[in-house]
Image: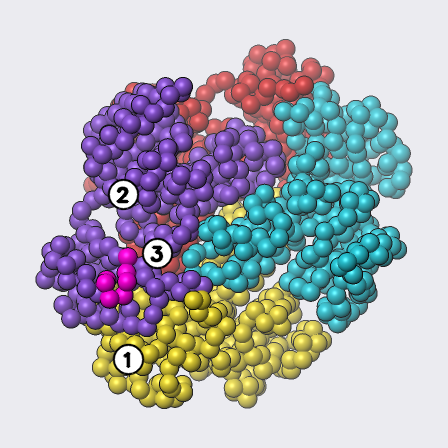
Chain colours: A cyan, B red, C yellow, D purple
Amino acid sequence: MAIETQNARKYRLTVSCPDKVGIVAAVTQFFASHNGWISEAHQFADTENCQFFMRYEVLADSLPFSLDELKAKFAPLGDEFDMQWQITDSAQRKRIVLMVSKEAHALSDLLYRWRSGEMNIDIPCVISNHDVLRSYVEWHGIPFVHVPVDMSNKEPHFQAVKEQIAAAEADAIVLAKYMQIIPEELCELYPSRIINIHHSFLPSFIGARPYHQAAERGVKQIGATCHYVTSELDAGPIIEQDVHRVTHHNTTADMVRLGKDVEKAVLSRGLRYHIEDRVLVRGNKTVVFA
Amino acid sequence: MAIETQNARKYRLTVSCPDKVGIVAAVTQFFASHNGWISEAHQFADTENCQFFMRYEVLADSLPFSLDELKAKFAPLGDEFDMQWQITDSAQRKRIVLMVSKEAHALSDLLYRWRSGEMNIDIPCVISNHDVLRSYVEWHGIPFVHVPVDMSNKEPHFQAVKEQIAAAEADAIVLAKYMQIIPEELCELYPSRIINIHHSFLPSFIGARPYHQAAERGVKQIGATCHYVTSELDAGPIIEQDVHRVTHHNTTADMVRLGKDVEKAVLSRGLRYHIEDRVLVRGNKTVVFA
Amino acid sequence: MAIETQNARKYRLTVSCPDKVGIVAAVTQFFASHNGWISEAHQFADTENCQFFMRYEVLADSLPFSLDELKAKFAPLGDEFDMQWQITDSAQRKRIVLMVSKEAHALSDLLYRWRSGEMNIDIPCVISNHDVLRSYVEWHGIPFVHVPVDMSNKEPHFQAVKEQIAAAEADAIVLAKYMQIIPEELCELYPSRIINIHHSFLPSFIGARPYHQAAERGVKQIGATCHYVTSELDAGPIIEQDVHRVTHHNTTADMVRLGKDVEKAVLSRGLRYHIEDRVLVRGNKTVVFA
Amino acid sequence: MAIETQNARKYRLTVSCPDKVGIVAAVTQFFASHNGWISEAHQFADTENCQFFMRYEVLADSLPFSLDELKAKFAPLGDEFDMQWQITDSAQRKRIVLMVSKEAHALSDLLYRWRSGEMNIDIPCVISNHDVLRSYVEWHGIPFVHVPVDMSNKEPHFQAVKEQIAAAEADAIVLAKYMQIIPEELCELYPSRIINIHHSFLPSFIGARPYHQAAERGVKQIGATCHYVTSELDAGPIIEQDVHRVTHHNTTADMVRLGKDVEKAVLSRGLRYHIEDRVLVRGNKTVVFA
């Protein structure tokens, strides 16, 4: 008998709590007692910090509960083990606001994945400080919101951005080459929910013009990093990284071009992990149940 | 509080059984009821075949059982869920017989990992059809057994090899460039316990002189494959694979040289997975809980 | 003094000839005598076959010749050394016809690279046996030509395709997931000018449904191959290959998804090499001066 | 006709000079006029700095000159084009002194490559500040020189090291996990001739305990860097770099173990480039004609 689970509706439980004996037993006993069919399961014990992490997918139809009922039933267990926990429903697509500037490589890649059904999200709007990518976005039937930025006073821009994000009821924001530093207030409003790509293999080459820095240092591989934005620039928890080999033949312009492919790759992988609730933050690091 | 688990003694449970509700609940409840501290846990539901796989590490000192007592206690659970299961003790180092021919790269790599303590095995002996590597092996204090092969009648060779392996009480055999086809009888005596490296990215270039085949075909990456030996040549379950980029500059001799590095890498990774009981065979494929 | 060459107009000379003393001396002496500034140079001596390959880029403005004059001047040298040679002008963008079926990942990737100016080509049209991707292509201002195929008699389809390609004055054709076998006649009309991606790490998994074959075999990496089409299926000269790691967690559907990223990568790299005249075919292999 | 060049004796010319028209023409004309057979050739024009680099291999037996005669003949050309140049003879194996501390992974890898004939060098001695690796080195028939270091006054140690290196008539020194900072005086005595591995993807994690820094930062790939030592710590020209993927499952101890494999790989590749005269230094960067 084959179980069709690939496209089945699932409840996704993620847990972070102090490690102790009996956590998994209690959680799996809970599901088993309601005949819940576990289709995917990951656990991780961070023994250095004695912290426990888990992510379970349970076939929604195997349980006799709505999402809210399930949460209510699970809550006592969460209390008992002092868990930070959440349960999501795979059928509720996350609402992801994209923010871009002028460069289209990351946007173009994400929109392909979205329209082909590969990336299971809703995109309520694309926000940009430039009007350059409007037509491309609108061809996809996605609203394009141009919020110009006054470089001498960025506050009105970010105030408007904040309102747009709120109006879009965004679950998360993706900075797909947005190229502006997010103010602290906005960072704190969406903790572990603003996803950025930095165009270097962090922590190398923090800040501006990383490919120029990389060319200057003569590195033999360039990289890119997908991370959650925190108020400290380029220092948030890393979700995904990758690299591409370069040689002396590659000019800085080549590095920019080659780097874009790495940027797209790590961003799409990182976003996929995020929307499937595979990323658990622990301090300034992540557990990614890929 | 940090739990020191990296070097602690563990019991390792691996399970393969038909998937159904309640397996993990039952297993974890079993451990929790005896206060067993789970330090690592992996599960996988093969939904296409409705088969379930798991691997748990439990701190040995957290349980009030010897290995044999633990097995006896666990057995009813195994029966209940129709499990193929085993429990091993990390303190019981596996006995790995190495078989080599004349080439030293894989042997040299494994012996370094062994003598540095990185690869937690006992090597009762190295068996070879040539006497070339004796001195190097013996410097390590490991017995070197030269079993010549008569190419017109290999049977006595393999009879002697079989006896040596039996005398060595080998848990597994590693063909570290042994370059002879293992007879069916020996394959069946050690199912999923004879580990080979094939010097190609299987299933490309099965059989002899794969680098010459690769050069002939003009591939842009060469690879190597670590797999369990079965009676069908180069067709056993794959444990690990990797590749290395080549260009037109690389001659066949270069490919052989570059390929050796890939061979060493996949063999040492594959062997590590094996000795830590991370590889579960399902049909002709593997689940590797890396 | 910095020479701006990145975007400068160049003449590109490629040569394949029997190896002997004095080839490079003669060629470079030829350029030097006309004050030609060499901005990039690659050579390769295939010593196994005693064949010599070279690719030189010369700043067009440093020479007192038009392209035709340069060819006329160079021809005696070509004769003297029995060269197969060509000289192209980087300012003459190649005309690349794309052929697609229903899948958009490769098309989408190429069109991004084209519209961003990263891929320096003209796309006279996109030809498809389905009408699915029309709107997307036409948004780019590129003509979309729907040529349906009658599966019981494909000849009229390929006759029409041939005419469309001819009308488009195509320099090369890219099969960006076109999913039909090209008839021998068309292959021979465009030797080393039809570029395909095969969705496996050739020569593994030739033919249909390679990801299913790969899943069946239990490989640990999946790959893709960009190659020139010849009349022998999936056996043409390989331009570029790459792989992506997979685990037991990955279903066949995952492999298809992950494989698409590798397909896009090898196709765009292979096409870039082709349009910059970096690929020289030698028998069934390639020299790629990347 | 196949030319056997793989193992043939070659003269290797490397050149760095201001770029201008006619360099390659003059050099190749020089070789052609003496009937010199070029078996490998690389050029690179650094257009940002208008500097030209080349490396040519010429079959020694095709020229009517000894190495000294060839140098004398070539010298006027070098003067004419203001070249920094050198010509070496592939038959003169370079003398490489290895320096180690207690860790054996890089040493063990290099000694395998040396004794198998893969790495074409002489090793006059291994110098160490500890006596731990003596037996292993001496098994290879290589002198082991123990030079203890007094941590409160390192000067006598480095004085003795300097004398040992001089006595060994070393062409280059490899710091195969030597773990001591080389004093400025020694750096300057062997410019671009002291090769180090740093156990991070430089410029990330400069200085001590890079794997601990990497674990702390939560990176998803760890790396290693092979570079020439200069008086500025971990800042010399990079020869080779590579990375290995890590996940949250990997402890710092795992990173150390996995990192060793990357360290070995980049060191052996970097050293191979060096001994084959494939590395040309330009400022703080390298051109590697691999």
Disc 3 from disc 2: Cα separation: 17 Å
Residue behind mark 2: D119
Query: Does residue A146 appear to the left or right of B224 in the view shown?
Result: right
Question: Local crowd at mark 3 within 10 Å, few (<14), some, or many (≥20)?
Answer: many
| Mark in front: 1 vs 3 | 1
Which numbered dot is residue C33?
1
Residue behind mark 3: D289
Which residue is rendered at x = 64% and y = 62% of the image? Answer: A105
Disc 1 from disc 3: Cα separation: 27 Å
In percent of width and height, residue A73 lies at 87, 32
Name the element at disc 3: loop
Please state which of residues D185 and A78 is positioned toward the viewer in this rendering: D185
Q: Could you tell me which chain the residue with mark 1 belongs to?
A: C
In percent of width and height, residue C118 lies at 56, 69
Please state which of residues B240 and D57 is positioned toward the viewer in this rendering: D57
In percent of width and height, residue B129 lies at 25, 34
Question: Relative to residue A250, is residue C169 depicted above or below?
Answer: below
Q: Are marks 3 and 2 in contact (CB under 8 Å)?
A: no
Q: Is residue B181 visible?
A: no
Toward which corner of the image does residue D37 lie, by quadrant? Answer: bottom left
Q: Amino acid at mark 2?
A: Met
Q: Is residue A13 visible?
A: yes
Disc 2 from disc 1: Cα separation: 42 Å
In percent of width and height, residue B273 lies at 50, 33
Which quadrant, please, contains the C terminus of chain A? top right
Which residue is rendered at x = 65% and y = 28% of the image? Answer: A46
Name the element at disc 1: helix
